[in-house]
Image (cartoon, grey):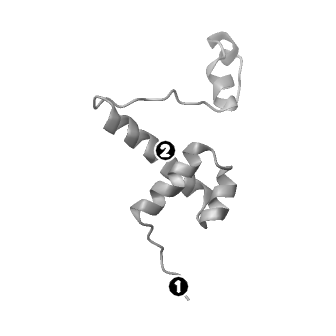
């Protein structure tokens, strides 16, 4: 049997996002409490924060610095001389 996709109302998404912003629990705890996936909680939290910044600001978007994984950070910090000896 095919499971039908659930549609969440705006007020429900706002309630979940606000709980995440307030830090009322970990993403896993909030996901369990509201019966949604943890990634969905994180996405709604991010959308709420970005929406607040846009609606309360002067229309300019606030960009956060992107985090690089440790593997990518280590690779990008190598010097050109150490890359020339690599035979991979």
Residue 81 visible to the viewer = yes
Q: Dot 1: what SS?
A: loop
The residue mark sitting in front, 2 or 1, is: 2
Q: Secondary structure at mark 2?
A: helix
Residue 50 image point, x, y percent: 41, 40
Which residue sits at x=58%, y=30%? Answer: 67
What residue is rendered at 53% in x and 85% in y?
2
Where is the N terminus found, in terms of image quarters? bottom right
Q: Name the residue furthest left.
A: 59
Residue 46 — which label?
Answer: 2
Image position of 51 with respect to 5: above or below? above
Examine the rendered structure and indicate whether residue 37 appears above or below residue 26. Answer: below
In the displayed structure image, the side of residue 34 where residue 12 appears, left or right:
left
Based on the displayed image, in which of its 4 quarters is residue 84 positioned? top right
Which residue is at a point 35% across and 31% down the rendered structure image? 61
Q: Earlier in the sequence, mark 2 or mark 1?
A: 1
Q: Is residue 5 left or right of residue 81?
A: left
**C-alpha gap between disc 2 and disc 1:** 30 Å
Q: Which residue is mark 1?
A: 2
Q: Residues within 10 Å of mark 1 (few under 14, many from 20)?
A: few
Give the camera-side residue of 49 and 77: 49
């Amino acid at each position: 049997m095919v499971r039908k996709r659930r549609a969440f109302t705006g007020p429900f998404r706002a309630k979940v996002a606000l709980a995440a912003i307030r830090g009322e629990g970990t993403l896993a705890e909030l996901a369990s409490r509201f019966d949604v996936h943890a990634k969905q909680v994180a996405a709604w939290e991010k959308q709420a924060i970005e929406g607040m910044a846009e609606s309360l600001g002067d229309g300019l978007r606030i960009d956060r610095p992107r985090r690089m994984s440790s593997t990518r950070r280590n690779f990008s910090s190598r010097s050109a001389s150490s890359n020339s000896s690599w035979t991979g």
